[in-house]
Amino acid sequence: MNNPKGPTPPSAGGPLPPELPEPEIVRPKRWLPSLVWIVPLVAALIGIALVVKSVVDRGPTVTISFANAEGLEPGKTKVKYKDVDIGSVRAIKLSPNLSHVLVTVELTKDAEAFAVKDSRFWVVRPRIGASGVSGLSTLLSGSYIGADAGRSKDSATDFIGLEAPPAVTIDEKGHRYTLHSDTLGSLDIGTPIFFRRIQVGQVTGYSLDKDGTGVTVQVFVSAPYDQYVGTNTRWWHASGVNVQLDSSGIKVDTQSLATIVVGGLAFQSPPGKPLGPQAPENATFNLADNETDAMREPDGAPVRVVMYFNQSLRGLSVGAPVDFRGIVLGQVTDIGIEYDPKEHNFAMPVTVDLYPLRLSRRAHGEAPAPYTPQSRELLRRLVDRGLRGQLRTGNLLTGQLYVALDIFPKAPSAKVDLDHDPIQLPTIPNSLEELQLQVADIAKKLDKIPFDQIGTNLNDSLKNANQLFTQVNGQLLPQLRGTLDEAQKTFAAAQSTLQQDSPLQSDVHEAMQQLTRTLQSLNSLSDYLERHPESLLRGKSGDNP
């Protein structure tokens, strides 16, 4: 009988118990894996799924070249379009020539349309420009790369990033135009464009002409204002403040306060003329310096003329107007100086450009075209009648001069060489210069008068007169004083004699009465003789026997 409590240990010195057999262990059969392997298996499946999803959702990878990598960080900087993430920066490295940086951008699957040739990329940072302040949100969130989807069908992976955001995105509706000007002025990218003082567009770019004679400006007019840009539209600089002083007073004109600081452009059709058909995309226009020049009718080809002046040209500058009785016919293009070795004198040539069409438009009859025999004959007749150039003062405060053309019938005769290029027109001094010449001539004549000799003779004469006065005072005056006393006595005696109650006056009065009575008797005798002339022979009738 087995002992449930196990084998009894042998007693000391007792016999050994028999050896027991080893127990047989039978393991149960299991067909399910251990739960420990489930978690790694699930993690591996999720990882594979994420890899597959990332491969499937991965968009194109593009490389963008920037001048520097300011504000860009790999793995953090995003690429956004309309504030929607369309990619991220994966790597940044220097170009082989160290002139710029190459930014590798991985776009999303939905942004495949950005991997075309005309797409544009730029770094959005805080900026202050002509169009205002932009990118302030990046002060907290950091810089990011902005994008503008192109419309090209050709794919591309390498792009040159813009250093500034584009003024107009590709999806904005409107029309683009090209303007040509002599100078850029105060224009910049983002400069506003005005139509009847309403902002309707902005400048999108500019470049220098290949020949260096001007600049080309690209502009964009937003819809629906682009319908007001016609084939007859005129464009001009509207920068700053235009101050005009005339008989009506002072006029100050500006498009807006913004144009005073950042400049601006304006366009409009000429007053009283139709707008014309709408201008097509990328139509070309001339850009005038101001509204007055823009609205002026085309002047046609200029006629170059030179005039020689024998006076100072101080106050005359290039661009000064050439005026004919209030009508501006052109402007001064060059001012020079020439030495005449024969006369040993200097002449001052002034070259001007004249536009005869400006005068012919205001004439009642049709003027001949420039550079024709008729126009040359007309110019010759005008010179014979006294057509001359003259310098006149345009502003008394600043002393600015301008060239005036006018008819002077009393001008000295002059000839004009119509075959000379440029044509040389005769000149005449202005009234102020003539006055100066007359004053100079008078001064020359005065210089010839011997004032020193006259002064010496006058001094001698004054000395002789002083001696004479001294002699008169010492010798003649006492005698004259005695003579005057005697004369005074004589006049007193005469006065006493001529008084009314003096005897002389009584005798004279009585004598006068007797003389009066005698004259009356003679008068009566004369009357009687006139009536009775025979009384001279016979006597009175009462006296006859």
Image: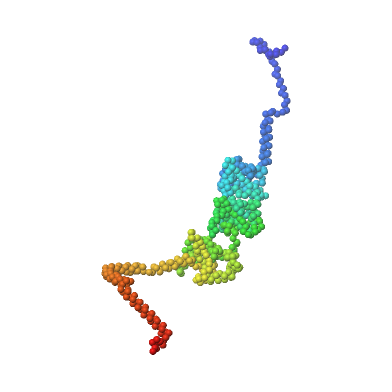
431 left or right of 479 in image: right
Quadrant in the rendering for residue 51: top right
Residue at the spot x=68%, y=39% of the render?
53
528 left or right of 67 in image: left
The spot of residue 415 in percent (x, y) is 52, 71
The structure's colour scheme is rainbow
* Frontmost residue, 522 versus 373: 522
The spot of residue 238 in percent (x, y) is 57, 54
As drawn, 73 above or below 386: above
5 left or right of 518 in image: right
432 left or right of 16 in image: left
* Frontmost residue, 225 versus 214: 225
As drawn, 534 above or below 193: below
As drawn, 410 above or below 133: below
- Name the outermost residue toward the front: 545
* Frontmost residue, 358 versus 100: 358
Residue at the spot x=70%, y=17% of the render?
21
Q: Quadrant of the C terminus?
A: bottom left
Asked if one can make out residue 496 in the rendered structure from this viewpoint, the answer is yes
The spot of residue 374 in percent (x, y) is 59, 70
Quadrant in the rendering for residue 81: top right
Asked if one can make out residue 480 in the rendered structure from this viewpoint, the answer is no
Q: How many marks?
A: 0
Q: Quadrant of the N terminus?
A: top right
The spot of residue 194 in percent (x, y) is 60, 53
